[in-house]
Image (cartoon, coloured by chain):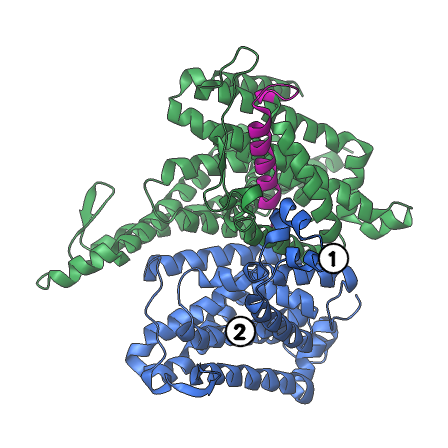
Chain colours: A green, B blue
Amino acid sequence: MKTQSVLFITAIALLLAIPFLLSQGLVDAAIQMLIAALFASAYNLLCGQAGMLSFGHAAYFGMGAFATVHAMNALDGTGLLPTPFMPLAGAVGGLLFGIVAGYFSTKRSGTYFAMITLAIAELVHALAPQLKDMFGGESGISAMRMPAWGFTFGSTNEVYYLTLVWVLLSIALLFLFTRTPLGRLTLGLRENAHRLRFLGYNTHRLSIMVFAISAMFSGIAGGLQVVSNEAANYVLFDAHLSAAVVLNTYIGGVGSFLGPVLGASVMTFFGYAVSDLTQSWLLYQGTLFVLVMMFMPTGLAGIIASLGGLHKRFGVASLAPLVVLSVISALLLSAGGTFVIEMLQRMLSQNYQSLASLQTATRWPDILLFGQSWPPASISTWLVPISLLAVGAVMGYLAKQWVQILIQREALKSESNQSEKEVVE
Amino acid sequence: MVSAGLTLIFGMMGVLNFAHASFYMLGAYFAYSLQGSIGFWGALLVAPILVGLVGVVVERFFLRRVHHHGHAHELLLTFGLSFIITELIKLVFGNYPVNYQIPDALNFAAFTIGGADYPVYRVLMGAIAIVMFIAIYLLLTRTRVGIVVRSAIYRPKMVEALGHNVPLVFMGVFGVGAALAGLAGAVAGAFYTTSPNMALELGVIVFVVVVVGGLGSLGGAMLASLLIGIITSLAISIDASLADFFALFGAREWAENIGGLMTLQVSSLSGSIPFALMLLVLLVRPNGLLGEKD
């Protein structure tokens, strides 16, 4: 518990210090990360804790965003709702829409539920550009952040702190929610809804409540997005946003409370850092997601947890080689994979194809990648990723064996301990 | 036709498949790239087989691994796979529509209705769809293979004990479902546009069709796709709005003042009608039009 609170305080201090440490562009990325983290946690309440898989959460995010943009335009940041409280409008928007959508979608469970949420999101996405008054058509609606409480909200840093406060507050509320009786019932909903019904609870109303609360916090995330961007457009309802939150949440790990926060921040950061370098970011994201689903269903948070468990069982000394092995293996594998994808992408791009057809003498001109030029027709070029992948795979295999050996050794030790005891007796 | 494939897979395996629309897209792209070497008809034959093989690989090496985690997990996995397939298509063929055309031999009008030519290819597409529906239906209900497949769904352990290879059956069903989607893509891709977005455009509608028709019901899927097709095309031709409806009661001005939904033309709403229909069906008959009680 003590290390946990130390970690917690360090994390908060780091978050507070970010505007002093990083450039403006990175602070902007940090705002996006925070918003994504809140969105993922809100999603996790529904998906991880209540076990309801939603594929249309962008709808509630978008509703919150539009509610906020209208509130910003209508109230001018004066009166009862100054700028810092604007995400509240998003919360109300998300909540109201969540109650309506939740009523329909929670009529069914499991995969039906997933499809209904998907259809509702698509319905909104198809309707939004038509309703010009409400959603501003194709061009969207823009608004201005008004000064309030002595802050101008003109600089990125002030927006960052506003976002940070809202995100921390919301995540804390979400965490406290899991401690309430309703939060415990949410888990029951996932584990055994039939039993809850036998116990006399109205599961449909319960599901609507959970759904609406999740939608409300998604709405806050949407509101924060608007406060940061000062504009909203029907693209917010796009299926990509719903997909991103699913991917982020699962990559982070649905089992734990902070997993989605971790996943969303990491993925958003990578998305920000890499989007200029590659055109296939979605491909990497999808591949990572499939790998997570297949080999480590508990996600990033699950890895950390199991690492902690191994640490307790075997100590640092025998664990260090394992960690080193698996980290190197993961790095090599991803380097090899990246090489292949980037190389193929450059080879198959339109520019390169036309270049290749122009230069008839050398059928395949060299490709510039990672600061070096590679002839795509020669074997040596392709040996690089193949060897990277091969060595990575071997390392991964060794790491797996290492765990096996550790477990066997432990079993042997406890056996010998037992036999010693028997001898003593 | 895609919804037939999807229904087949879901009804038979309990796997709802996000990647199905991607198989449809793969079919179109395979047919496009094969067209040059073996001609249109050859491509129409080979592309579904290739897609079916991809489906088999997906089932064998991806889905089977996570089968014990449950439905939601499988659904998510196919979701991720559909992402990867779309991105790979973009990588290989570029992020723009490719020039996949109907062969000239088929590009003429079958007959003329009210001055509008009705292309023969449309007739062909309809014919293929109907033949496929009938073939699947007969296969599942009238043959020995169909009996084994259907019983493998309800009591996999029992069927296995009787000496049938259940994992092979599942793999086959998934492959056939994928191949059907591939055929649909190969046929439809030539008529509509073949682009990396076609999976997304189709995918959602297919889900709506399946929910409206009732999961696992072939007849329901057929009925629902017909219903949605007819209503949507009817809606496009209606040039009226709710305000006109209120005008019948002399409340036109009031309705127009409200704006928003009231003044929207029905024709511009046609895109959202399938979803509205789905919500309606879920309210009135949650199991779909022809779905069984669960």
Q: Residue B145 versus residue B156: which sits nearer the camera?
A: B145
Q: Quadrant of the C terminus of chain B?
A: bottom right
**Residue B42, how many percent across, how many down?**
37, 84
Circle 2 is placed at which residue position?
Answer: B175
In the image, farthest residue toward the top: A150
On what subunit does the disc labeled 2 rest? Answer: B
- The magenta segment is A55-84
Pointers 2 and 1 in contact (C-beta within 8 Å): no
**Residue B137, how many percent across, how many down?**
64, 84
Circle 1 is placed at which residue position?
Answer: B249
Label 2 and label 1 in one chain = yes
Relative to B166, residue B133 above or below = below
Quadrant in the picture for residue B100: bottom left
Q: Earlier in the sequence, mark 2 or mark 1?
A: 2
Q: Is residue A73 magenta?
A: yes
Q: What secondary structure is found at the residue carrying circle 1?
A: loop
